[in-house]
């Protein structure tokens, strides 16, 4: 294919081993090092410089930067400012759900940041919800997700508080379904051991 294109006058890129060299993509390495140390990922830097993540990784390593483990959980790669904000919000008593929503992070990241900091996790407890206020806001058109952020809990918790009869019926239905599945699994296991 390459020879056919060259025969038609189409220039080809230099290939390893044919004596040619690809032009070196220049990266502002001082800026890249600074941004990487601020928490940017190699992929984000690749987008910034118009090259691949692996090329950024290579250039940063050539510059002597201690690279973060790309397979490490995101919590080990977040900025120190965001880590401090997570710890401050948790210490101030904000709920898990509210911290995740306000700081745009995940449960896993929050859990890892707390574990790495040595901060003791609070035992989960019931939040006192102002059900009447939540009903008023729901009538105004707020979604269960928005109500959860307002109340500092999950959308499911709000739904259960506003629909206690449906919530109880759902719990009972799930119990029946679980019991049915367990019976079916036990019967299948018994049939397999007999056969």
Image (spheres, helix red, strand yellow):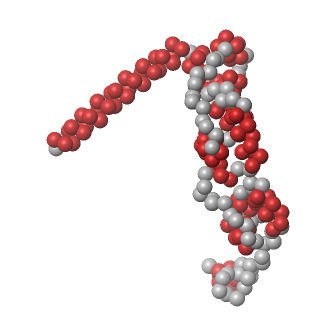
For residue 171, what is the image quadrant?
Answer: top left
Nearest the viewer among 146 and 150 is 150
Where is residue 123, by image quadrant? top right
Left or right, 178 with reference to 107: left
In which quarter of the view is residue 126 placed? top right
- Residue found at the very far bottom of the displayed protein: 19
Q: Is residue 181 left or right of residue 157?
A: left
Q: Residue at x 48, y 16 (%)?
A: 168
Number of numbered discs visible in the structure rendering: 0
Q: Residue at x 68, y 64 (%)?
A: 67
Which residue is situated farthest in the left direction here?
Answer: 194
Residue 109: give x, y in percent of width and height. 63, 44
- Is residue 105 placed above or below 10 in the rendered structure? above
For this rendering, which residue is in front, 130 or 194? Answer: 130
Q: Which of the pair 135/82 is nearer the observer? A: 82
Residue 43 position, x and y percent, is 70, 59
> Residue 5: horizontal and vertical position, in percent?
68, 79
Residue at image location 61% in from the left, 37% down from the top: 120
Q: Please state if 188 lies on the left or on the right of 144 as rendered.
A: left
Quarter holding the C terminus is top left
Q: Residue at x 34, y 26 (%)?
A: 179
Residue 89 against residue 83 in the figure, above or below: above
């Amino acid at each position: 294919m390459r020879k056919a294109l060259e025969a038609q006058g189409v220039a080809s890129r230099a290939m390893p081993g044919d004596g040619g060299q690809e032009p070196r993509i220049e990266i502002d390495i001082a800026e890249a090092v600074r941004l990487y140390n601020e928490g940017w990922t190699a992929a984000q830097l690749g987008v910034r410089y118009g090259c691949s993540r692996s090329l950024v990784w290579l250039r940063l390593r050539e510059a002597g930067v201690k690279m973060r483990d790309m397979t490490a959980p995101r919590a080990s790669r977040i900025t120190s400012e965001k880590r401090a904000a997570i710890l401050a919000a948790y210490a101030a008593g904000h709920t898990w759900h509210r911290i995740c929503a306000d700081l745009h992070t995940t449960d896993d990241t929050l859990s890892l940041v707390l574990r790495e900091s040595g901060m003791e996790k609070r035992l989960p407890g019931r939040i006192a919800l102002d059900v009447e206020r939540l009903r008023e806001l729901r009538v105004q058109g707020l979604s269960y997700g928005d109500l959860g952020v307002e109340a500092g809990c999950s959308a499911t918790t709000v739904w259960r508080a506003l629909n206690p009869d449906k919530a109880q019926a759902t719990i009972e239905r799930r119990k029946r379904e679980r019991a049915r599945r367990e019976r079916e699994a036990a019967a299948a296991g018994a049939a397999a051991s007999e056969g």
